[in-house]
Image (spheres, grey):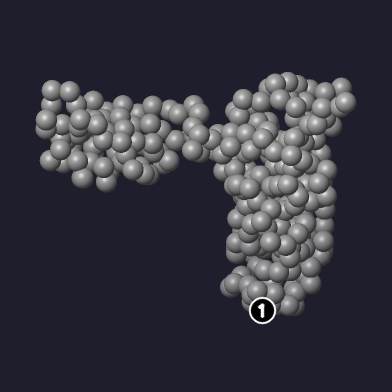
Amino acid sequence: MTEPRLRIAVQKSGRLADRSLELISGAGLRVMKGINDLLYRIENQPIDLLRVRDDDIPTFVADNVAELGIVGLNVLQEHFPDADLESMIVMRLGFGGCTLKIAVPNDVAYDGPQSLEGKRIATSYPNILGRWLKDKGVKAEIVEMRGAVEVAPRMKIAHAICDLVSTGATLEANGMRATDLVLKSEAVLIKAPHAPPPELAHLYDIVVRRFDGVVASTGAKYVMLNAPKAHLDDIIKLIPGADGPTIMQLAGRDDTVAVHAVCQENVFWETLDKLKAAGASAILVLPIEKMMK
């Protein structure tokens, strides 16, 4: 009898592909390349990675071909503009960040969404753009394109574009500037509408829990320090992103306690200087390799 296997749909190539594999490896799942690039297997768990086009990932998951998928929020929202996305999203993954923005030629005046009234706008995201225009009360013609959207104004195909912006270098090279924000996107973990088969339920929970631990530990730091009891409240306020630090009495020191805290924010040298000035001593900041809530 064939062993049941959990299936995770991931991007075969593109800006999320490598980071998705890093997330999976960071969760202790050893990736093995298959006989082709479309199917990878996990060596230490009964899991298959379905490596497909990013546009296909929402469909694979929605149709229960895969129990889980890693995809950009922009792709998910474009495919299911009227769906309750929060019911599909298991967690936001904190990588693959980008913005979908309106952009116009540098020599064109732009005074907000109303400047687009009656204009032609080229985009690869007609559903997202259509909803945004409707919300803004703007009537404009949407020109759907599947690539090189930034050349549309120069080719007289459209007056403006709606496209993904990361650094803005592509827009600058084409004599354009970004204006209004349409959507802020990042990679998300999505789930199939039906629960996994009973024989896969435990593995499913393990994968989700490990992914959550990887995301939670990314950029997190573990801070340890000694603090005089008289200045404890002031010192705790200075620890960035600390939620309920652990306070322990130091042996042989009635006036000083040890403070341990997990920080979800960056801990800069300036923060250490402030902690020192407030009376903290023996300050240690350590990276967190793994964390499980």
Q: Identify the secondary structure beneath mark 1.
A: loop
Residue drawn 81% across and 65% down?
143
Q: Nearer the viewer, residue 122 or 151?
A: 122
Amino acid, disc 1: Gly
How packed is label 1: few (under 14 Cα within 10 Å), some, or many (20 or more)? Answer: few
Measured from the top left, where is residue 184 in percent x and y?
Answer: 60, 55
Quarter holding residue 159: bottom right
The correct choice, above or below, for 108 with respect to 265 in the image is below
Measured from the top left, where is residue 248 in percent x and y?
Answer: 24, 31
Measured from the top left, where is residue 67 in percent x and y?
Answer: 75, 42
Quarter holding residue 86: bottom right
Whether residue 113 is visible here, answered yes or no, is yes
Residue drawn 69% across and 61% down?
84
The correct choice, above or below, for 186 with respect to 259 in the image is below
Q: Is residue 56 left or right of residue 293?
A: right
Q: Nearer the viewer, residue 245 or 77?
A: 245
Quarter holding residue 225: top left
Q: Nearer the viewer, residue 84 or 197?
A: 197
Q: Nearer the viewer, residue 137 or 282?
A: 282
Residue drawn 13% across and 26% down?
253
Kindly identify which residue carries mark 1. Answer: 137
Measured from the top left, where is residue 202 in percent x and y?
Answer: 67, 35
Whether residue 105 is visible here, answered yes or no, is no
Residue drawn 64% across and 75% down?
136
Q: Is residue 228 left or right of residue 247?
A: left
Q: Is residue 23 left or right of residue 161?
A: left
Q: How many badges with numbers are in the image?
A: 1
Quarter placement of the N terminus: top right
